Image: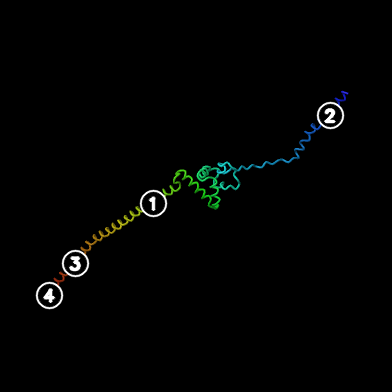
Amino acid sequence: MDSFDTRTTTTSNNTTSSPLSSSPSSSPSSHSSLPLATTSPTIVVTPCAACKILRRRCAEKCVLAPYFPPSEPLKFTTAHRVFGASNIVKFLQEVPEAQRADAVSSMVYEANARIRDPVYGCTGVICQLQKQVLELQVQLARVQAELVNMRCQRANLMALIFMEMEHLQQPSSLANSVDDLHCLGTNGAFLDEAVLWETQLI
């Protein structure tokens, strides 16, 4: 009875081990029939500076992405500190797309001015520039007045030079006229003597 049990156990072990022994021979054919998986390149989308600072997911059509690139985080930090992210987005949505770049530059400039001068902000810069313009206009008026004065002095000097030249030319003309008169006088005396000599001969 015991020998029969041992035989049955050995046969059962042989039958159970047969699939395992046959599996390695069948595995290469099954792997060869499966298609190879192609690995597509992963595209890493860098969030804009605004979304990165706000710690939110940067959408595909993010309004702030074209104007706040990842390489300029300070630009958004300055504008966000003064205006706030919601106000910046609202303002950009109200402005036409062609003017949004100028609007962002204006906001960043005004934010920098407000941080430097919390009381007057951009108005203080405008007043200072207007003061410089007025000072430059006064300097320009002075230079123009000096230029007109120098032109007048030059004209007066040229007139004096011409008058001196005329005075220098007048004595020579007088001397020429005196010489002419002297010649006429000598010629007249010579004619008178010739007439007297002829009358004596007659």
Amino acid at dot 1: Leu
* Residue 152 x/y as whole percent: 31, 57
Q: Nearer the viewer, residue 44 or 5?
A: 5
Q: Nearer the viewer, residue 185 or 101?
A: 101
Residue at the right extreme of this rendering: 1
Mark before the other along the chain sequence, 2 or 4: 2
User: Which quarter of the rendered picture does the C terminus lie within?
Assistant: bottom left
Mark before the other along the chain sequence, 4 or 1: 1
Point out which mark residue 181 bears: 3
Amino acid at dot 2: Ser
The residue drawn where x is 55% and y is 49% is 90
Q: Which residue is mark 4?
A: 199
Spatial distance from mark 1 to mark 2, Cα to Cα?
A: 111 Å
The secondary element bearing badge 4 is classed as helix
Q: Which residue is mark 2?
A: 12
Q: Which residue is mark 1?
A: 134
Mark before the other along the chain sequence, 1 or 2: 2
Corner quadrant of residue 55: top right
Spatial distance from mark 4 to mark 3, Cα to Cα?
A: 27 Å
